Amino acid sequence: MTVVTAPVLLICGDCDALLRGAPSTLLPLRCPRCNDVVRERSSGGLDRALALYFTAIVFFAVVNAFPILSLGLLGESSDATLFGAAQALNARHMSLVALLVGTTTILVPWTELIASVMILVLARRRERPRVYLRLLRIRSTIQPWNMLEIFALGSLVAIVKLGSLARILVGTGFWALWGFLIVSAIAARAYRREDVWNSAVPRLWGPA
């Protein structure tokens, strides 16, 4: 069985030149028109991104398992969690808002994490890219609906605004949430679609 390593098409982000490059991620590629780096040198990019996404999964599991904030007022205390926020909205007869909050802060992040890990695992195994297209489409579709950053900013606003009115304790989930956001940002930076797609290109063409 002979595998054909067909060239890949790349677009320069600076001058929009269409370039044809080899499906190798070991060497950098510069645009001959503007000398801008189109594809940077990558060493273990898939493994690094995969490790970061696994770390993000651990952080997000902690976020879902532990309270983010604990509010104490008049001798009573209550814990705020991601699922608890959706439950509280549903209890106030705001079912649509509760569904939106639960989807954008729990379901969408979990789906994005799992899809990203599956894409990277398939890329490392150099599987045929039929599944890639579906997972990449799912990932790109749900990414704009990930609203955990807004939830984290809302937690900071609650600490500032309610700090003088009630006793607020920062829970384990709060620190895990910010850890998740930081690791997710680094993982998104390490996740390079060129590395993923170039791993699939040799298998895309099949036997000669």
Image (tube, rainbow, N blue to C red):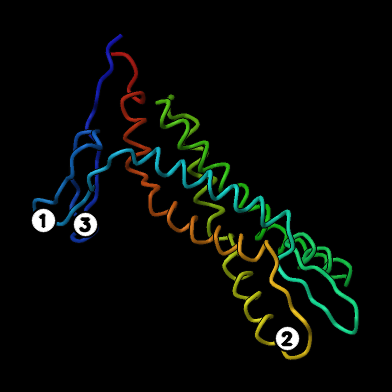
- Give residue 48's quadrant in the image: top left
Frontmost of labels 3 and 1 is 1
Image quarter (top left, top right, bottom left or bottom right) of the C terminus: top left
Circles 2 and 3: CB atoms closer than 8 Å? no
**Residue type highlighted by circle 1:** Asn
Quick check: 197 above or below 78?
above
Q: Position of residue 165 (x, y in %)?
A: 77, 90
Which residue is at the far bottom? 164
Q: In the displayed structure, does residue 90 sit left or right of residue 173? A: right
Give the residue drawn at x 66%, y 74%.
155
Frontmost of labels 1 and 2 is 2
Q: In the displayed structure, does residue 147 sit left or right of residue 189? A: right
Instruction: Give how far apart the Cα atoms at labels 2 and 3 are.
Output: 50 Å
Which residue is at the far top? 1
Quick check: 66 above or below 152?
above
Query: Tag 1, which secondary structure?
Result: loop
Q: Which residue is mark 3?
A: 16
Frontmost of labels 2 and 3 is 2
Q: Position of residue 68 (x, y in %)?
A: 70, 66
Residue sitting nearer the eye, 196 or 62: 62
Residue sitting nearer the eye, 144 or 17: 144
Q: Which residue is mark 1?
A: 35
Image quarter (top left, top right, bottom left or bottom right) of the N terminus: top left
**Residue type highlighted by circle 3:** Asp
Instruction: Give how far apart the Cα atoms at labels 1 and 2 are.
Output: 53 Å
